[in-house]
Image: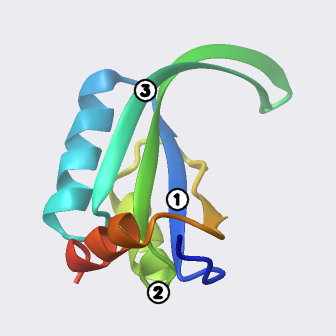
Amino acid sequence: MNTEASTHCVVQTALPSEAQAAELARAIVQARLGACVQVQAIRSFYVWQERAQDEAEWLLAIKTRCALYAALETFIRERHPYETPEIVQLPITAGSATYLAWVDANTA
């Protein structure tokens, strides 16, 4: 098990449709900014412009290296339909050394 703190991370964002989520996920992997992007249907409850919202969304969980976060954030912002998209970085503090090496190889 690799226990190096903060060399790898998961970056999350959410999109309003499955098609948009798939398109962004594919573009991220093709740009080698993420080794793997998982997409799942979610339901989000939040307040936007003083109104309670209840929306179906598609969550992207992007496995990448912390060193790529700034470039990935810019990439997402340039392609995201929301005015204020969720873009958060969650550090991976431990993980399989072989999996993290695979992430490195696919984001080189």
Q: Nearer the viewer, residue 77 or 97?
A: 97
Secondary structure beneath dot 2 equals: helix
SS of the residue at dot 1? strand
Give how far apart the Cα atoms at labels 3 and 1 are.
14 Å
Q: Is residue 18 above or below residue 101?
A: above
Q: Is residue 93 left or right of residue 48?
A: left
Q: Indicate the amino acid at tag 2.
A: Ala
Residue 9 occupies quadrant: bottom right
Residue 33 in view here? no
- Vertical order, 82 against 74 (above or below): above
User: Which amino acid type corresponds to the residue marked 1 in the rendered image?
Assistant: Val
Dot placed on the residue nearer the N-terminal end, 3 or 1 = 1
Label 2: how many Cα within 10 Å (few below 14, some 14–19, many 20+): few
Mark nearer the N terminus (2 vs 3): 3
Query: Residue at the location (72% across, 17% down)?
Result: 53
Q: How far apart are labels 2 and 1 at the CA level?
A: 12 Å
Q: Is residue 40 left or right of residue 83?
A: left
Q: Residue at x 62, y 77 (%)?
A: 3
Instruction: Give the residue at mark 2.
Output: 67
| Residue assigned mark 3 | 40
Q: Secondary structure at mark 3?
A: strand
Q: Is residue 13 above or below residue 46?
A: below
Comes first in the chain, label 2 or label 1? 1
Residue on which disc 1 sits: 10
Q: Residue at x 36, y 23 (%)?
A: 17
